[in-house]
């Protein structure tokens, strides 16, 4: 989950990395140095980050600054539920609860770009019911709601 109000930032990054390392070990997945570096970059600001911004950041830490390097790592991180792509922003955010479930919903503030990851089994069941009714087999459910967070709404009212 993206949350710019994180007051224990280094702890949340290290906790996430520890979680991902454990999940990868349990599943026999390779959590390479570049995958780890990109995951850390994604979690650094708790803001959505574009692939080309990640690309420019990895060149500063002695990794190949070629787009396929970043996209392969992002594919791995998304496929395994460690990050989410925010389609409306063409950006990536870290998953606050990797390995728990794949259907998350995002509330995105159009002013401060804060992204909150939300999970609601009732919404998931409703969407799947509609899909089944229409005999539609889905690959992935992505729901994004754009608007204003409470903090930005309060500022705009003043």
Image (tube, helix red, strand yellow):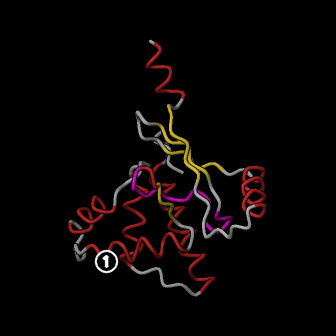
For the point 42% across and 70% down, which residue is it? 74
Reading the image, the residue beneath label 1 is: 69
For the point 68% across and 65% down, which residue is it? 100
Residue 39 occupies quadrant: bottom left
Q: Residues within 10 Å of mark 1 (few under 14, many from 20)?
A: some
Report helix, strand or loop for mark 1.
helix
User: With respect to residue 26, does 55 lie above or below?
Assistant: above
Outermost residue on the bottom side: it is: 28
User: With respect to residue 25, does 156 lie above or below?
Assistant: above
For the point 47% across and 37% down, which residue is it? 109
Tell whether position 96 is magenta: yes
Magenta region: which residues? 89-102
Horizontal side of residue 148 vs 89, given as left or right: right
User: With respect to residue 75, does 39 lie above or below?
Assistant: above
Q: Position of residue 157 (x, y in %)?
A: 47, 14
Q: Quadrant of the C terminus?
A: top left
Q: Position of residue 29 (x, y in %)?
A: 54, 84
Q: Position of residue 116 (x, y in %)?
A: 55, 45
Q: Nearer the viewer, residue 86 or 139?
A: 139
Residue 56 occupies quadrant: bottom left
């Amino acid at each position: 989950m993206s949350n710019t109000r994180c007051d224990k930032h280094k702890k949340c990054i290290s906790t996430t990395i520890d979680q991902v390392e454990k999940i990868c070990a349990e599943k026999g997945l390779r959590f390479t140095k570049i995958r780890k570096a990109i995951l850390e970059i994604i979690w650094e600001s708790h803001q959505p980050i574009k692939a080309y911004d990640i690309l420019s950041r990895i060149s500063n830490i002695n990794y190949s600054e070629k787009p396929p390097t970043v996209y392969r790592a992002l594919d791995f991180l998304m496929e395994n539920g460690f990050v989410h792509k925010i389609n409306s922003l063409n950006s990536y955010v870290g998953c606050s609860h990797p390995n728990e479930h794949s259907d998350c919903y995002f509330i995105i503030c159009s002013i401060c770009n804060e992204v909150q990851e939300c999970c609601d089994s009732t919404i998931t069941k409703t969407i799947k019911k509609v899909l089944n009714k229409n005999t539609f087999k889905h690959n992935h459910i992505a729901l994004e709601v754009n608007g204003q967070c409470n903090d930005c709404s309060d500022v705009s009212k003043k």
